[in-house]
Amino acid sequence: MIRNQWYAVLESREVKKGKMLGVKRLGERLLFWRGTDGKVVCLVDTCPHRGAQLSHGKIVDGHVQCPFHGLEFAANGDCVYVPSIGRAAGAQAKFNASAYPVLERHGFIFLYWGEVEKDEALPPLGWLDELPHDEFAYTTVVDHWKVDYSRVIENQLDVAHLWLVHHNTIGRGNRRVVDGPMVEWYHEWSEPTILNIWVSNRKDDGATTGKKPKQVEKPPRHPSLQLRMPNLWQNWISEDMRVVAAFVPIDAENSRMYFRYYQRILKAPILRELFLAAAWVMNLRIERQDKRVVETQMPKRSDLDIGEKLFPADYPILEYRRRRRALIEKNNS
């Protein structure tokens, strides 16, 4: 996993006021809850005193109380009370817990996984910021995958499997020959952050071969697929339909997918909800078609030089691996 990045890790609806949520993300036990102001906060879910899991405790006067010895922690991790020492002693910095910056945007909770003292600002989120959320309604498929999140991301960049794995859903038409795909990095600031992919698949006519990526010109249309590092993805279906996903790292062999279907075609409440319910069923079916195969891949974590033999249609995957490796080498030292 890449350090010093903002990761989408949860949906806002999962962290409820007055309740604590303990989850594993990015290989760590983490605790989320909402402070007295309603804002989400995050601590490492381990008491510095004796290692008890804080999420098994409770919230007392806006503080997290350890279930073992009653130490209390503020939203920033400061230990404000140690019962065995006494309230008159005040805060005890020796027992401060580790905290991570978190922010909410568009129904996702983002966590900055890096050096807390940097307190980096959440950068622009590309299409997720640009999407007119007041016009679109969406439904979410949430699922656990027994594989590293990098494998799940690569599956959504893979345009060569559609005709086979999704033969009776989004892969209908038997378009198995891949021209390209055309790939281009978009720089939101000084570094490439969004990978744009234009998909161009066709039937095998038996007379021509697929064009290599460098042989394909950039189409005038919107990119079919977009990946925003480190873990957001979009499938642009049309101006009125999108699929957005967050691929959330749990640990090296597990991940969680949030798969959202957005639409603004139907606006009448009843018709809209019926449409979204049908979309939820279809997206779950598509997602499970992928999951069945991806969970068999070895190794469970992808990288450069893992012994795989790639073909030209894998170019988006190769570009993702190169960029991911560069970020790891830059930020994980």
Image (cartoon, grey):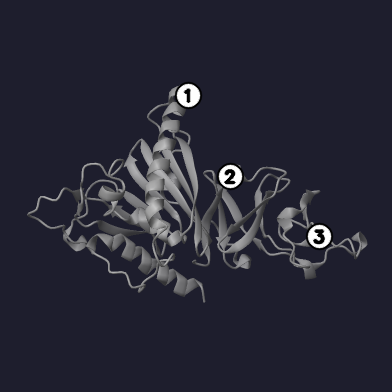
* Element type where label 2 sits in the image: helix
Instruction: Inspect this view and state whether residue 263 appears.
Output: no
Query: Disc 2 residue type?
Result: Ser
Task: Look at 27% across and 44% down and name the residue there.
Answer: 167
Label 2 CA crowd tier, 10 Å (few <14, some 14–19, many 20+): some
Amino acid identity at mark 3: Phe
Cα distance between the residues tagged 1 and 2: 22 Å
| Closer to the camera in the image, 187 or 314 | 314
What residue would you read off at disc 3? 68
What residue sits 32% from the left and 65% below the top? 318
| Among the 4 quarters of the image, the one containing residue 259 | top left
Left or right, 236 with reference to 200? right
Q: Mark 3 or 1, which is nearer the eye?
A: 3
Disc nearer the start of the sequence (3/1): 3
User: Dot 1 lies on which element?
Assistant: helix
Disc 3 crowd, CA 10 A, few/some/many (<14, 14-19, 20+): some
Q: Position of residue 280 (x, y in %)?
A: 44, 37
Residue 18 position, x and y percent, is 72, 44
The answer to which image quadrant residue 64 occupies is bottom right
Measuring 57% from the left and 48% from the top, which residue is drawn there?
104
Above or below: residue 166 compared with residue 276: below
Q: CA distance from mark 3 to mark 2?
A: 29 Å
Q: Which residue is mark 1?
A: 269
